[in-house]
Amino acid sequence: MSTLAILGGEKVRQEPYPQWPVFDERDIEAVTNVVKSGRWGGFPYPGPNTSEFLKRFVEMQGGGYPVLMANGTVTMEVALRAADIGWGDEVIVPGLTFQATAAAPMAAGAIPVIVDVDPGNYCMDPAKIEAAITPRTRAIIPVHLGAQMADMDAIMQIAEAHNLIVIEDCAHAHGAKWRGMGAGTIGHFGSFSLQSSKILTTGEGGILLCRTPELQARVESIINCGRPYEQDGKRIYTMGANYRLGEFQAALGVVGLQRFPEQLKQRNEAANYLEEALSEVPGVRILRRDPRLTTRTIYIYGFAIDPEVFKNPHEVVCAALDAEGIPCDTGYPPMHRYDLFQPGLSRLPVPSAFPERFDYSQASLPAAERAGELESVWLDESVFRDGHKGVDDFIAALKKVQANGEELAKEAAHRRAK
Ligand SMILES: Cc1ncc(COP(=O)(O)O)c(C=O)c1O
């Protein structure tokens, strides 16, 4: 049995996984053309590359009225504000996500109400939503996490019954489809991040898909310093800020979309191959493959380990995999444990005004806690971009880490004692 790399042995994977983002001459030419055009962005919005990028993005997602902006956090804040959701309103968010999903409502003055996830796919559990609805609830933000999509059928049904706005957080779900409908086109808004790690990236950026042209006009005004928009023959000013994105980024987005379909196909083929191999590793639970997720996209790929079988919790397993050359991590901690949401620790006005709504000291979100503290392992997209070789190396490393579970546990205990 070969020695683990974390204990000084040879790594399973010697060469690094392929870098992200990728680029070629087309990106250089696109940026150069923007330089030469003299239209670098700013006002007036949208510039020609922005319009082109958004047109193609909407074609890919299959609908929506798009607005390009600075990142995939303000997209959600602006969506809430465009829907008149703000001070003291409640917004339901899942317990496993990047903190932006809850920070955006807080920035808009609203209260994020954290509900548990479905252990089968780590996305918001629709069965937990109704109990969290109060007279102040105005919106739900489901997150399509990793390679999954939240159950949009159940979520939309609840939202319609309670007259709630749905903002899909699609930061991980570019190109994903639910019963053939594009992620971000099912709710009232779809929020996408274009930040550098994302599978469609312009370095920084975000796209908000709106359900109607009226919402789009309002969103465009909010991100464009509050400049007025026309509605029913009236000029309407909004309380806005400058959240526009420049033309350089949009030009990179146009090229990124040219490469996107091939990348999606390649990652998906590798993910299918991985699941066959992973299903034979004891102590591994593959997340549910919902037949309604008709196109899945792989940003990060999550699965669960049984810490008993691996003889170690996920952070120890991930550290050992990392040492073997596998880019992975334990993922998001359960969000109700974050300091940001504890009363008194945030300097934002909303937790100070409603401390009881931010007090999660007695909260129990068992599925998010089990995933985030014990069992979830998230693989980086580059593992899949490297095809079968990338997957084979990962499987070999996982088996090695499992076979050496006892030595690893001893080492982890030793490190903790230090
Ligand atoms: C689930 C989720 N939502 C929102 C965001 C925020 O996106 P951005 O970094 O573009 O603000 C991220 C970014 O990593 C994310 O993973």
Image (cartoon, rainbow, N blue to C red):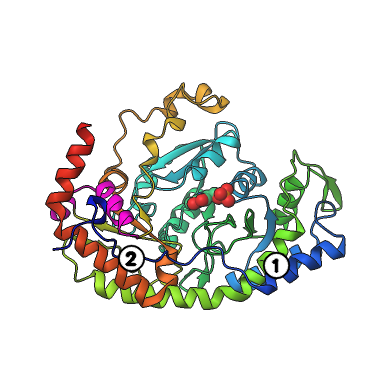
Q: Position of residue 303 (x, y in %)?
A: 30, 60
Which residues are drawn in magenta?
Answer: 307-325
Q: Residue at x 48, y 38 (%)?
A: 112
Vertical placement of residue 407 versus 400, above or below: above
Kindly identify which residue carries mark 1.
53
Badge 1: residue crowd in 10 Å (few <14, some 14–19, many ≥20): many
Tell me: 415 left or right of 165.
Answer: left
Q: Position of residue 111 (x, y in %)?
A: 51, 34
- Relative to the observer, which residue lies in front, 236 or 32? 32
Q: Is residue 321 magenta?
A: yes
Kindly identify which residue carries mark 2.
13
Determine if residue 127 is in view. yes
Q: Is mark 2 within 8 Å of ligand 1?
A: no
- Relative to the observer, which residue lies in front, 138 or 304? 304
Please identify the quarter of the rendering in which residue 63 is found.
Answer: bottom right
Amino acid marked by disc 2: Arg
| Tag nearer the camera, 1 or 2 | 2
